[in-house]
Image (tube, grey):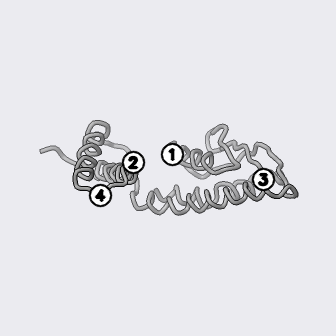
């Protein structure tokens, strides 16, 4: 009987949750198909004896509210700048240092920043992330870093 690793179980759970969210159905045929398809995908792509660093499913689930909060606040900020011409729009590129060490963590941060309105990740250079931002106020990259990535970076560290 094949061994199933914790990593495979975690990925199966994440893919199955995505399956249920995309199908928006709780019929037993849909759920069974989701279990079979996600299990097959994980079996094909993730070896049971993987030496990759384990990640935390709980950390990933707790990151979603952090990201959603940042997404809503960024949407409100951009909408206010569009609707109120007195609010400054001062676009610029800022270099934001990050404490994230692994490539997948930096990738999650870069994608999260790009998905929030008003920012887009341009480049990642070692531990620095270059971001085009809609409202650059001064030259302090530490301040910009905390404003742009703050809670998201701390949430990604828990994954």
Labels 1 and 2 touching (C-beta < 8 A) = yes
**Residue 137 place in picture, x, y as percent:** 83, 54
In which quadrant is the N terminus drawn? top left
**CA separation in Å, label 1 and label 2:** 10 Å
SS state under label 1? loop
Q: Which mark is residue 82?
A: 3
- 62 relative position to 70: left or right: left
Q: Which residue is mark 1?
A: 102
> If you read the primary sequence from the N terminus, does the residue marked by circle 1 or circle 3 appear first?
3
Q: Which is nearer the eye, 45 or 116?
A: 116
Q: Which mark is residue 26?
A: 4
Labels 1 and 3 touching (C-beta < 8 A) = no
Q: Which residue is mark 2?
A: 53
SS state under label 4? loop
**Residue 16 place in picture, x, y as percent:** 33, 51
Q: Which is nearer the eye, 93 or 25?
A: 25
**CA separation in Å, label 1 and label 3:** 36 Å
**CA separation in Å, label 4 and label 3:** 41 Å
Tell me if mark 2 has few (under 14), some (14-19) or many (20+) residues whose alpha carbon lies within 10 angstroms of its own. Answer: few
Tell me if mark 3 has few (under 14), some (14-19) or many (20+) residues whose alpha carbon lies within 10 angstroms of its own. Answer: few
> If you read the primary sequence from the N terminus, does the residue marked by circle 2 or circle 4 appear first?
4
SS state under label 2? loop
Image quadrant where residue 145 sits:
bottom right
Q: Nearer the viewer, mark 1 or mark 3?
A: 3
Q: Nearer the viewer, mark 3 or mark 2?
A: 3
Q: What residue is at 51 percent from the left and 42 percent from the top?
A: 103
> If you read the primary sequence from the N terminus, does the residue marked by circle 1 or circle 2 appear first?
2
Q: What residue is at 49 percent from the left and 44 percent from the top?
A: 104
Q: What residue is at 48 percent from the left and 59 percent from the top?
A: 158
> If you read the primary sequence from the N terminus, does the residue marked by circle 1 or circle 4 appear first?
4
Q: What residue is at 56 percent from the left and 46 percent from the top?
A: 106
Q: Which mark is residue 17?
A: none
């Amino acid at each position: 009987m094949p061994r199933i690793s914790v990593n495979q179980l975690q990925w199966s759970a994440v893919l199955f949750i995505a399956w249920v969210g995309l199908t928006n159905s709780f019929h037993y045929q849909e759920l069974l198909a989701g279990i079979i398809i996600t299990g097959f995908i994980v079996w094909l792509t993730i070896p049971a004896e993987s030496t990759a660093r384990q990640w935390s499913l709980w950390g990933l689930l707790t990151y979603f509210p952090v990201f959603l909060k940042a997404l809503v606040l960024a949407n409100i900020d951009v909408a206010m700048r569009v609707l109120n011409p007195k609010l400054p729009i001062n676009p610029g590129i800022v270099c934001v240092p990050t404490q994230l060490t692994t490539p997948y963590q930096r990738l999650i941060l870069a994608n999260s920043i790009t998905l929030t309105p008003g920012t887009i990740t341009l480049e990642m250079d070692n531990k620095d992330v270059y971001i085009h931002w809609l409202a650059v106020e001064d030259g302090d990259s530490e301040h910009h870093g905390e404003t742009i990535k703050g809670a998201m970076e701390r949430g990604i560290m828990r994954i």
